[in-house]
Image: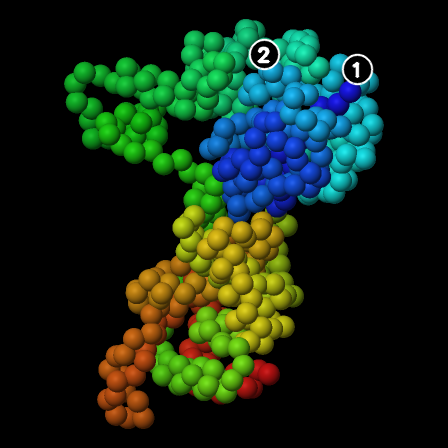
Amino acid sequence: MAQVLEFKLPDLGEGLTEAEIVRWLVSVGDVVAIDQPVVEVETAKALVEVPCPYGGVVTARYGEEGTELPVGAPLLTVAVGASEPADLPASSTSPGLSSPAGPDAAPGSSASSASDEASGNVLVGYGTGAPAARRRRVRRASVADPVAVGAVSVPAPVVQPVNGTLGPVAVVSPLVRRLARENGLDLRELTGSGRDGLILRSDVEQAIRQGVTQAQPATPAPAAAPVGLSASSTASSWIGAERVPLRGVRGAVADKLARSRHEIPDATCWVDADATELMAARTAMNAAGGPKISLLAVLARICTAALARHPELNSTVDMAAREIVRLPEVHLGFAAQTDRGLVVPVVRDAHTRSAESLSAELARLTEAGRSGRLTPGDLTGGTFTLNNYGVFGVDGSTPIINHPEAAMLGVGRIIPKPWVHQGELAVRQVVQLSLTFDHRVCDGGTAGGFLRFVADCVEQPAVLLRTL
């Protein structure tokens, strides 16, 4: 008899605790091979295809596209040993019901008895050879005994404590329960719009909006929100307002920028530089043959040379230990705008790379970002960020530091401007450079010295020869 194994959302690394289902790659009844990608999820870091470590027939999927699931939540169940969709019980497609091993299987024996049908491959914190280590404290909840349905054992609806009492609630997602709890909603009073009456996040959000609207006074509200009424509650009462969830990449960017502004006492300095010689040097390098070198790669090479002279800016601050941690390697992040939002891919060991190597790696990461195939590892671990906002046609900016780094260099557009060159007025290619730095790691003298060195390299690329 086929054994039904439950595949849970694995830990995708870098402390990620949840992911959003973007696209299912399999349907109930499909036969899947070991390590075949079954679902595409979006984390706070990247778009990831998740492979299933079991081979067999998909008996159930959990969560519609657009649903957020926490790490450890069921993704799907697979009937290991079954080869025909006809072997599946009719009710195996019910969403929100967890399906463990069949009734004939001994507790805890499913994975071991089906070891030939599992790859044993490990995603971060997840493997098929042993139960995944528990990463977070799970709140206890009373669960009714499972009810046998055909050959699959299906648990009864969760009995979730609500407002101090117990009662059956048709809700699966912990995120939905938390949202209701934080807003004082009794889930037993809601009617779910999902299949079989399942309560979805949209049901809870609609109930919150209705509750706030009903609570508004008939007379016009004052301009300032009353004490005790949050800004989010006020915003939810706006008629015709569009609500865009802050999740995925956009949510991660929002969290990181807010944290940066909250924790880092930053300062910005800037300078205009004559980039005419830099543009000529790049043209000469590309005319010599071989792979083309991008302007961003030349600027990245200048950054690594400047950081070698001013290592204070390649650091992070450990406030718990009250220490500045100067980092030995330069992992250079660069801001890239994609259809999914702003991402910051990281070039590993940038300080050891030539301009040609930097150009190739920057091109690879940029293409991966545009296609949504950056991995969490591609987006983490940076020590310094280069932001070329000149591609948007702007001259200057005051960059927000990419927490927990200590500095970011911004580069504006390079355009012809009147400039005094060798004592005479001429038209030169001019660029504005700006450096935002964490004032805890250094003072203005160090930051100014870094920026001046970068500007000197832009104006006279031969200065780089002294650092080789």
Task: Judge from the rendering whether residue 204 lies leftward or rightward of residue 223; answer left or right.
Answer: right
Q: Residue at x 58, y 43 (%)?
A: 49
The answer, for residue 436, to whether it is visible in the render is yes
Residue at image mark 2? 157
Q: Residue 390 appears in which quarter of the rendering?
A: bottom left
Task: Judge from the rendering whether residue 114 lies leftward or rightward of residue 136; answer left or right.
Answer: right
The answer, for residue 208, to whether it is visible in the render is no
For this rendering, which residue is in front, 98 or 416? 98
Q: Residue 330 appears in which quarter of the rendering?
A: bottom right
Task: Judge from the rendering whether residue 465 lies leftward or rightward of residue 427; answer left or right.
Answer: right
For this rendering, which residue is in front, 16 or 76? 76
Q: Is residue 197 above or below residue 46?
A: above
Q: Which mark identifies residue 104?
A: 1
Given the image, on which type of amino acid does mark 1 rest?
A: Asp
Count of numbered circles in the view: 2
For this rendering, which residue is in front, 299 or 84? 84
Which quadrant is home to the C terminus? bottom right
Give percent across and percent down for residue 35.
Answer: 69, 41
